[in-house]
Amino acid sequence: MSIIIRLDRVLADQKMPLTELADKTNISVVNLSKLKTGKVKAIRFSTLEAICDVLACQPGDILEYDPKTSE
Amino acid sequence: MEQSFDKKRFNTVMNITHVITKIGKWLFIVAFGFATLSVLVGLVLMIINVDLGAIEVAVTEASLGGALGENLTAIDAILLLKQVLVFGGLAGMVTLAFLIYVLHNLDLVLDNVKAQQPFVHNNAVRLFNLAYGFMIASIILPIFQFLLRYQIMIENPSIDINAEYTLYTGYLFVGLLLYILAHIFAYGSHLQTSYDETV
């Protein structure tokens, strides 16, 4: 997929573990893990909003578009 | 306006259906055993040509001859009994095997529904199997009925019976309906997968 998830980079910058993000966003660790490893096909705006709210970042910090990357 | 879903009624219906399916499946399995036994007994009687004796002949005349309203001779009655045992048992076996197959697939579908996973790929596959099963049964099952009636007609000219092959159009219609439903479930499975892969 050409959309790359950079959640791990943002979490590392903020030194926040995935479990803490899960607690603060009310999203399960399983789903966040799938998101982090790029195993999801879509993300809801509500989920994106919750993550950006907790990490105080922009959606563009988490999502990156690379047309050269193929599925 | 959002429509409310009566989960309690749904659960009640599913539970009752599940219980009936399980009981029905086992009853049909037992009946299949009896049908198999009937075929085996009939084959044994045909092969070894057992003389059933005066008592059995009297019973056969009284039951089969009386039921068909014909004056069967003792030999006709015994021959008819053997044919009914073999060909009737065979028709019964095939019909019961099909019904067991239907209930078994339905049982598996209901297991997934109870596990709150109705729209999984396996359920769509099972519905396709049921659809094909009904369509094939609409052609195959009448053959065995025809064979039974034909055998009786040929071997017992004194019995007034017709032997015609008639397609089970009801089964064919159910098969077509299930085929359409299976496609809907397959689409539902696709939508469920998309939903599950959305965070």
Image: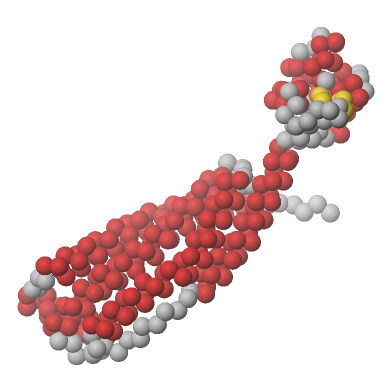
B89 lies above or below B126: below
Which color scheme did the rendering employ for the protein? secondary structure
Please name whichever residue, B128 or B118, is drawn nearer the observer in this view of the structure: B128
Residue B67 placement (x, y as % from top left)? 26, 83
Residue drawn at the location 86% of the way across and 22% of the way down: A62
In-image side of B30 versus B124 (left or right): left
Residue B130 placement (x, y as % from top left)? 52, 58
Query: Based on the displayed image, in which of its 4 quarters is residue B30 positioned?
Result: bottom left
Please name whichever residue, A47 or B89, is drawn nearer the observer in this view of the structure: B89
Residue A66 placement (x, y as % from top left)? 86, 27
Please name whichever residue, B79 or B140, is drawn nearer the observer in this view of the structure: B140
Residue drawn at the location 55% of the way across and 67% of the way down: B174
The image shows a total of numbered marks equal to 0
Which quadrant of the figure contains the N terminus of chain A?
A: top right
B111 lies above or below B54: above
Which quadrant of the figure contains the C terminus of chain A?
A: top right
Q: Is residue A47 visible?
A: no
Residue drawn at the location 72% of the way across and 29% of the way down: A39
Residue drawn at the location 62% of the way across and 45% of the way down: B120
B39 lies above or below B120: below
